Image: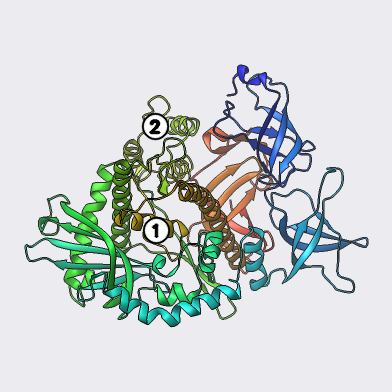
Amino acid sequence: MIKEKTLTRSFVEGVITTTAKGFGFVSVGEDSPRENDIRIEAGFLNTALPRDRVKVRLNAKIGDIQQTGEVVEVLARAKVNFVGTIDEENGATFLIPQDTRIYVDFLISNPPHGEKLRGKKALVRLSDWTDPKKNPTAEIIEVLGDAGDNETEIRAIVLDKGLQMELPEKIHREADTLKKTAPAFIAEEAKKRRDFRKVTTFTIDPADAKDFDDAISIQTLPNGDIEIGVHIADVSAYVKPHALIDEEARKRATSIYLVDRVIPMFPEVLSNDLCSLNEKEDKLVFSAVFTFAPDTATNPTSKVTMRNAWFGRAIINSAKRFTYENAQEVIDSGSGLFYDELNTLNIIAKKLVVQDKAGGAISFEHEEVRFELDANKKPIRVYTKKFQDTNKLVEMFMLLANKKVAEYVSEKLEKTGNKGEHEGDLFVYRVHDEPKPERLAELAKFATGLGYKLPLKEGRVSSADINKFLEQIKGKPEETMLNTATIRTMAKAIYSTRNIGHYGLAYEHYAHFTSPIRRYPDVMVHRILAHFLADEKVTKEEMSEYRSLAAHSSEMEKLAADAERASIKFKQAEYMSERVGKEFNGTISGVAEWGVFVEEDETKCEGLIRISDLGNDYYIFEKENYRIVGKQTRERFTLGDKLKIRVKAVDLERKSIDYELVK
């Protein structure tokens, strides 16, 4: 609730989120005294569009009703390029925006003469829009193609997020030059590096992976200790700061994983060849090597005992490219190539899971949607990825490397005086803040109503107590709804030079070190680690650069994730468009004023049952209880409820599915 004393200011600034219905909400940020977003009713948005920074005049506050206001000025546009579908009416050409949060169509100021554009998708640039009584005008930058066509839709998804598709030709030329000089470079580097080429080493990756940025080595030392190496592609050995390839990778900050393709951060000459840890090839790596006591693997009741850790540059030659599936087959069968090594790694990985959980690491069950596409990239099957022990095996050793690298650098920062109080450390952490008190309070109230207790202490809860809560609901009828509600209380992990720890993993120090082929922050971590290993000084200018790059990487990660989700939504809608009228089983995945969102159980295709299709009643949205309740019948539709549904309609352009209730 907004406190009365906060109303002394009549104007605030913040970031707006708009809706297709023409109203919006302004978030004024963590530093604001206002605890709730400000609701902006239809007609009072001025010319604000999603994610714009705006100035808001506050209306008088009435009791406990949500604070409302009026946008008086758009201070900064979040973006000016938009994608949508072209329509023509009364001699005028309009663009209907792809983003459903945009409540107004754009008038095209430069329609190509003599070209039939209706039904085509286009990328446009917004002109100055200052009069909310008129439609905004925009210029066509590029006509993308026919709406519904796979290539058109994928390009539309990427460009609408402000992301780029193809790498410039000059980047490929620079990569080709690196490839030509690579053999001599590797031979020279091999003389300076720790050599693991005779140590058993392999990769474990998805069956369709093309770039391999991590490998694991294992050997038993003469004293019986077990040495395990986590070897990561040494991208920074090839890509120097401010080279053309580096500048392009900085801008992109991440590879983008769409349903039918990967848009790489680096050219494929690097990502799939030079830097990729391909089988039976000498490769340069940056390594984190751990030595464990023998009983870590041999004694089922012993804890993980790590003797020491070594970090440095090395060279490897992977003996085998495993998929998760065939590595799992070796473990399950008890025989096969590298069974002993895989089994030892699996035993230690399971102990690392127990160790992390005891430390408070939260483990949410999650499912990843996968598609089987035909030759035309149409989805013929939608399924969820099966997670096996080998997935967890790789995950745990990558987590260990990330954690130990961050701990090592943090210790160095303490010793060298490079720890910053206000501007942050000379390092790029992966941080995860604790949940906001108001979200936890809502969850605790919801859980209490269902007979469960979430122990809050001054509005906070430890990650260990979250784990106990999840254990409490495991196997219970309310598990799905409470698990979903708990996930939604969590903050988003980001990159930062200011270390606040990682709440979800319960680590005091954590960074991303293990995927430099697809994440630019990992490249930065490699460079910083190299500085400290060489006892080199890092300047304040470099510190400032890393700080801004960390913030940029967080933003680009979010945009890439949005694009990835949109590509999944498009393929799910395309799949269900062939199944209109068919019945399925589903689970309520979200509740809103206008209806309930339902996820089909097998394919995870989410759609909306509109409130008008729920029944002959007036339904009341109870936000705090995650449900809609019929006023007369008292019929309830609650998060996690199981329903029988029928596919009513599909809109491919909006990537939306409408379901109806089967009674």
Outermost residue on the left side: it is 223
Of residue 16 and residue 599, the one placed in the foreground of this image is 16
Q: Residue at x 27, y 73 (%)?
A: 316
Q: Amino acid at mark 1?
A: Arg
Q: How many marks?
A: 2
Scheme of colours in the image: rainbow
Tell me where residue 175 appears, x and y as whole percent: 50, 76
Q: Residue 451 bears which disc, if any?
A: 2
Closer to the observer: label 2 or label 1? 1
Q: Could you tell me residue 358's position as x and y percent?
A: 25, 43
In the structure shown, which secondary structural element does the residue marked by tag 2 occupy?
A: loop
- In this view of the protein, which residue sits in the foreground, 289 or 358? 289
Vertical comparison of 513 with 424: above or below:
below
In the rendered structure, the answer to whether residue 142 lies left or right of residue 377 reads right
Residues 121 and 368: in front is 121
Residue 652 sits in quarter: bottom right
In this image, 234 relative to 306: left or right?
A: right
Q: Is residue 227 left or right of residue 211?
A: left
Task: Answer yes or no: is residue 344 visible.
Answer: yes
For disc 1, the marked residue is: 527
Q: Residue at x 84, y 50 (%)?
A: 135
List x then y, in percent, for residue 63: 65, 19
Label 2 CA crowd tier, 10 Å (few <14, some 14–19, many 20+): few
Labelled disc at residue 479: none
